[in-house]
Image (spheres, rainbow, N blue to C red):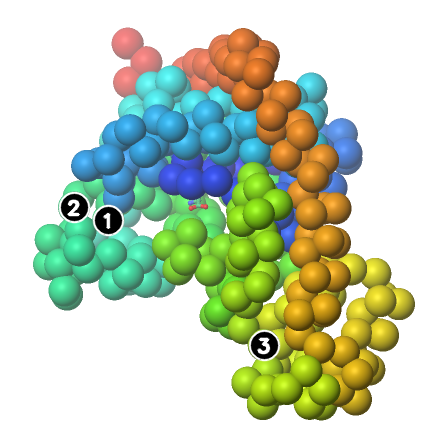
């Protein structure tokens, strides 16, 4: 049985270092392994908590696609498509909604966390939760099974959603006969990248992210304001690099030898924070410069991006039809 890699991204903002060192490294590796790889730009899912901000979602469908292309996701190996262009996904979501209880959705840890983070939208205690948001795990199960996705590269936060998809698949198969495959998650090796402020997570909404498309001036400003060891007041005070975000990012983008030197000098107080930050700015820009160049290329060749999305979406449409026929037959609604 052929494996199919399938994943999705909500188009709500540009990619940052957290994505790059997490999910994206996983995608780059997997695209070389010769399996079919479907990558959904999940605009319908993005609308579940951005229904009042359609311009944002629309803009970011383009942004996230070009960010992915700019880091080296190869459209000849990875099939990009837009969720809203595949009506079968919406149709499947309705069918699956009979196979899951409301209380099971309310207990989904990822959904629970997200509801509590979105008080403005869903109320202090989640009392204004929408039907659509509560049900997005069902829609994600449709995303996956609509294309028979078997291997799902995701971050840890997505595991409860994959588990819920597996439950839906089992329930479906037990009622309508063996039709769907249970997907398995593939976790990225780097779990999480910390934010500039030392927060455990880098995130757009946390305001502590370095974006892949940040220009060199922005990168400079952000790194200059990154959190360092608060015990280091003077340039030659010894400090603990483990309490410093600058050293933390050096470990991501600088080589081992330089990291060792920086670590030792920091402990001895023979390197100042400004010099250390300057070196990081240089290394960070070395990483980001080729990405910026490619991004600019795509911005100047929008027709190429459109072609990639359209061709990928057309291929996905064909696939969805086949799978849908199979599912409707199993459900005895193949009139
Ligand atoms: N929920 C995922 C996220 O927020 C995005 C997503 C949509 C997805 N559809 C998917 C992930 C299907 C894996 C498989 O990042």
Mark 3: few/some/many CA within 10 Å (<14, 14-19, 20+): many
User: Between 219 and 208, which is closer to the camera in this rendering?
Assistant: 219
| Residue 164, percent from left and from top | 40, 51
Q: Is residue 328 above or below residue 307?
A: below
Query: Disc 2, ligand 1: is the CB inside 8 Å?
Result: no
Give the residue drawn at x 77%, y 35%: 33
Element at label 2? loop
Q: Nearer the viewer, mark 2 or mark 3?
A: 3
User: Between 218 and 156, which is closer to the camera in this rendering?
Assistant: 218
Left or right relative to 225: residue 53: left
How far apart are the two marked residues, 1 and 3, measured between alpha carbons?
Answer: 40 Å
Query: Disc 3, ligand 1: is the CB inside 8 Å?
Result: no
Q: Which residue is mark 1?
A: 134
Q: Nearer the viewer, mark 1 or mark 3?
A: 3
How far apart are the two marked residues, 2 and 3, measured between alpha carbons?
Answer: 41 Å
Give the residue drawn at x 53%, y 14%: 302
Q: Is residue 240 above or below residue 69?
A: below
Mark 2: few/some/many CA within 10 Å (<14, 14-19, 20+): some
Mark 1: few/some/many CA within 10 Å (<14, 14-19, 20+): some
Q: Quadrant of the N terminus?
A: top right
Q: Is residue 197 above or below residue 265?
A: above
| Residue 299, percent from left and from top | 55, 21
Give the residue drawn at x 56%, y 33%: 67
Give the residue drawn at x 59%, y 82%: 229
Left or right relative to 237: residue 182: left
Q: Which residue is mark 3?
A: 228
Q: Which residue is mark 2?
A: 130
Asked whether the beta carbons under mark 1 and mark 2 sit within 8 Å of each other, the answer is: yes
């Amino acid at each position: 049985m052929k494996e199919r890699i399938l994943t999705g991204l909500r188009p709500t903002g540009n990619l940052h270092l957290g994505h790059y060192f997490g999910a994206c490294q996983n995608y780059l590796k997997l695209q070389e392994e010769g399996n079919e790889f479907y990558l959904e730009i999940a605009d319908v899912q993005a609308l579940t908590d951005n229904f009042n901000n359609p311009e944002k979602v629309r803009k970011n469908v383009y942004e996230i696609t070009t960010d992915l292309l700019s880091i080296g996701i190869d459209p000849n190996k990875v099939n990009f498509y837009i969720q809203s262009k595949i009506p079968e996904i919406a149709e499947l979501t309705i069918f699956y909604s009979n196979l899951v209880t409301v209380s099971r959705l309310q207990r989904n840890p990822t959904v629970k966390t997200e509801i509590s983070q979105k008080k403005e939208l869903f109320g202090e205690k989640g009392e204004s939760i929408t039907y659509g948001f509560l049900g997005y795990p069902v829609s994600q199960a449709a995303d996956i099974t609509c294309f028979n996705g078997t291997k799902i590269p995701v971050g840890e936060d997505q595991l409860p959603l994959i588990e819920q998809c597996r439950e839906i698949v089992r329930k479906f198969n037990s009622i309508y006969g063996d039709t769907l495959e249970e997907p398995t998650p593939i976790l990225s090796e780097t779990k999480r990248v910390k934010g500039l402020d030392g927060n455990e997570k880098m995130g757009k909404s946390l305001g502590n992210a370095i974006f892949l498309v940040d220009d060199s001036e922005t990168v400079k400003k952000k790194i200059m304001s990154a959190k360092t060891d608060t015990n280091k007041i003077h340039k030659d005070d010894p400090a603990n690099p483990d309490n410093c975000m600058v050293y933390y990012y050096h470990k991501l983008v600088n080589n081992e030898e330089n990291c060792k030197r920086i670590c030792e000098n920091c402990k001895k107080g023979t390197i100042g924070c400004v010099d250390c930050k300057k070196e990081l700015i240089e290394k960070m820009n070395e990483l980001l410069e080729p990405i910026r160049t490619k991004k600019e290329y795509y911005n100047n060749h929008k027709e190429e991006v459109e072609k990639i999305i359209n061709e990928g979406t057309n291929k996905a449409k064909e696939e969805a039809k086949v799978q849908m026929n199979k599912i409707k037959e199993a459900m005895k609604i193949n009139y």
